[in-house]
Image (tube, grey):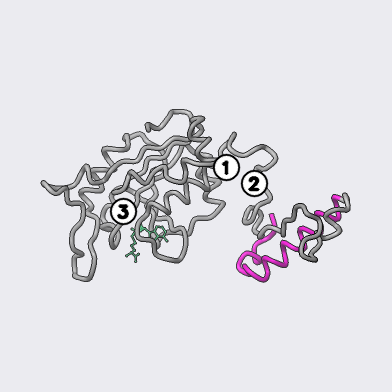
Amino acid sequence: MVPNVTGFSATILTLYPEMFPGPLGTSLSGDALQKGIWSFEARNIRDHGIGRHKAVDDTPAGGGCGMVLRCDVLAEAIDAAIPENDTRPRLLLSPRGKPLTQKRVRELVQGPGVVLVCGRFEGVDERVIEGRNLEEVSIGDYILSGGELGAMVLLDACVRLLPGVMGKLESGSEESFENNRLEYPQYTRPRNWEERDIPDVLLSGNHAAIKAWREEKSDKLTAQRRPDLMSKPRS
Ligand code: SAH
């Protein structure tokens, strides 16, 4: 699929283009893809591989286990996929990157889209990170076998915030992380289940009391589970 000019467009460089859109082709993001609210193009890095075997990797300089994605191959793939005047941020999925946050996701959806480079093996030659201005982004403190699932996580987080994807009412402004707090507990019918009741206040119709209850629960949960967030003001 070719990036469209109006919507949010993602160019993904990967050794496994067939993984896309994968889960992003279903549900909210799938509908949005159909509607052209976002688009993607998955480019195979191997098309720029070297020799008869289309080699893309080689052994690490200095020794050690595994293989490293070659800088010349990856740079050629990037140059072929991205026009010179392309203003989209170029992100390399990498466990060494700055952890992805809701704040960064909100920034990304303000722009025209993203270029996502998916690493494999032991990672990529450092020189292409420098030479092609790649910003390393991590989706968490654990190691995946490749950047593709990370790219999908990032795209899913972006796409749901694009105008027209979620209803206006669910703009996501009350969700976890949006105000430096985790979300309050949610309930729905039935009112009584296995001797557990929905808290009375939520059924009281008193909006001020409900708001106060939710803020209190949200502060308490955040203090217990994510004390690091508590040092930031509720926004
Ligand atoms: N040797 C590397 C890990 C390589 S994992 C290191 O120790 O830093 C292979 C590829 O998977 C990486 O190049 C990256 O693109 C992707 N990847 C692994 N973990 C990730 C994470 N937490 N966030 C984003 N991408 C990740």
Task: Let me know if residue 233 is in the magenta part.
Answer: yes
Tell me whether the residue at label 2 lies in contact with that at label 1, contact meaning CB atoms closer than 8 angstroms: yes
Q: Is mark 2 within 8 Å of ligand 1?
A: no
* Crowd rating for badge 3 (residues with CA inside 10 Å; few <14, some 14–19, many 20+): some
Up the image or down, 169 lies above or below 125; here it is above
Asked whether, in this view, residue 235 is left or right of residue 195, the answer is left
x then y, percent, for residue 209: 86, 55
Q: Which corner quadrant holds the C terminus? A: bottom right
Q: Most prominent secondary structure in the magenta stretch?
A: helix
Please give the residue where the numbered disc 1 appears in the rendered image. Answer: 161
Residue 215, label in figure: none
> Tag 3: residue type?
Ile
The one nearer the camera, 141 or 110, is 141
Which comes before the other along the chain, label 2 or label 1?
1
Give the CA distance from mark 2 to mark 3: 33 Å
Q: Position of residue 21 (x, y in %)?
A: 42, 42
Mark 2, Cα crowd under 10 Å, few <14 / some 14-19 / many 20+, is few
Q: Which residue is mark 2?
A: 172
Q: Is mark 3 within 8 Å of ligand 1?
A: no
Task: Nearest to the eye among marks 2 and 3: give it.
Answer: 2
| Residue 148 relative to residue 37: left or right | left
Segment tinted magenta in the rendering? 207-235
Q: Which residue is mark 3?
A: 129
Residue at x 51% of width, y 33% of height: 37
